[in-house]
Amino acid sequence: MVRAVVYVVAFYVVSAMFLVLGSWLLLGPRSWAMAGLSAHGSTCLWLLKKIVGTGLEVRGHENLPEGPVLVASKHQSAWDTFALVPLLHDPAIIMKRELLWIPFYGWFSAKFGMIFVRRSAGAMALRHMAQDAINRAAKGRHILIFPEGTRREPGAPPDYKPGALFLYDRLDLSCCPVALNSGLYWPRRSLNRFPGKIIVEFLEPIPPSLPRKEFARQLEAAIETASDALIVEAAAAPNPPPIPKEAADRLGIMKSSRHVGED
């Protein structure tokens, strides 16, 4: 817990320094600002490894197609929002529009050319999101979306929203699903951080132009199957992280582990 608290303090101090000391980047080319965003992600990953002992393993990175692609990732933790950036090419992330009003953070998000969605606008929001994504993809950028829209506890029942399906239909690009286990080591709504190895796995891309229902089926099956496998793998590690009880019950992870069911 002491290491976790030290890291949380370091994370926010470093993030504030990047935002404030790097504010001059708001006046420069967007590519410079994106380089700063990637450097922030790499720095926070390095600190997490040094302070807490939580490393990163990337699998299947070769599955990312050349050029623009829709990247649909599992979302379990705040970790996902910064750690995936250095792994992608000039990513444009789908974000809720309310984040624009946060000083510095919102200004930089606009500078990065992220894609903002006003959820209350319904179908109109999806159309604007798709047009912005088309514009970003035309510049060769990766389009990153979290299909469930918000962080979900590892092993929780899937809750996929229509955004990824809508983008896939409009972009006519391959979609690369991403599985991960970040929520085991950086739990949502908690100051706890656990040592071990966060795994990000880029899965076999789904080709464009599939029927909508078939794409939705393949996307959910790929992400959920691989993410469940990563939970089981983490539970079998010599020093496993806490496994949420719902996940442990569903995946048949032995209850005898002292970690199972802890928060």
Image (tube, rainbow, N blue to C red):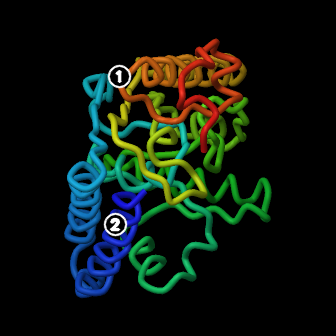
For residue 126, the mark is none
Identity of the residue drawn at 36% across and 51% down: 91
- SS for tag 1? loop
The C terminus lies in which quarter of the figure? top right
Residue 127 vs residue 44: left or right? right
How packed is label 1: few (under 14 Cα within 10 Å), some, or many (20 or more)? few
- 159 vs 81: above or below: above
Answer whether labels 1 and 2 touch (C-beta < 8 Å).
no
Q: Nearer the viewer, residue 59 or 255?
A: 255
For residue 238, the mark is 1
Point out residue 223 in the picture as x, y percentages from the top left corner.
54, 25
Q: Nearer the viewer, residue 100 or 236?
A: 236
- 199 vs 30: above or below: above
Task: Tell me the distance, in whole angstroms, between the alpha carbons under discs 1 and 2.
Answer: 24 Å
Identity of the residue drawn at 38% across and 49% down: 138
Identity of the residue drawn at 46% across and 22% down: 230
- Quarter of the rendering containing residue 213: top right
- 223 vs 44: above or below: above
Point out residue 126 in the picture as x, y percentages from the top left corner.
69, 53
The N terminus lies in which quarter of the figure? bottom left
Residue 98 vs residue 133: left or right? right
Amino acid at pointer 1: Pro
Q: Earlier in the sequence, mark 1 or mark 2?
A: 2
- Quarter of the rendering containing residue 61: top left
Amino acid at pointer 2: Val
- SS for tag 2? helix
Point out residue 17 in the picture as x, y percentages from the top left corner.
27, 81
For residue 6, the mark is 2
Point out residue 101 in the picture as x, y percentages from the top left corner.
57, 82
How packed is label 2: few (under 14 Cα within 10 Å), some, or many (20 or more)? few
Identity of the residue drawn at 56% across and 44% down: 146
- 18 vs 50: above or below: below
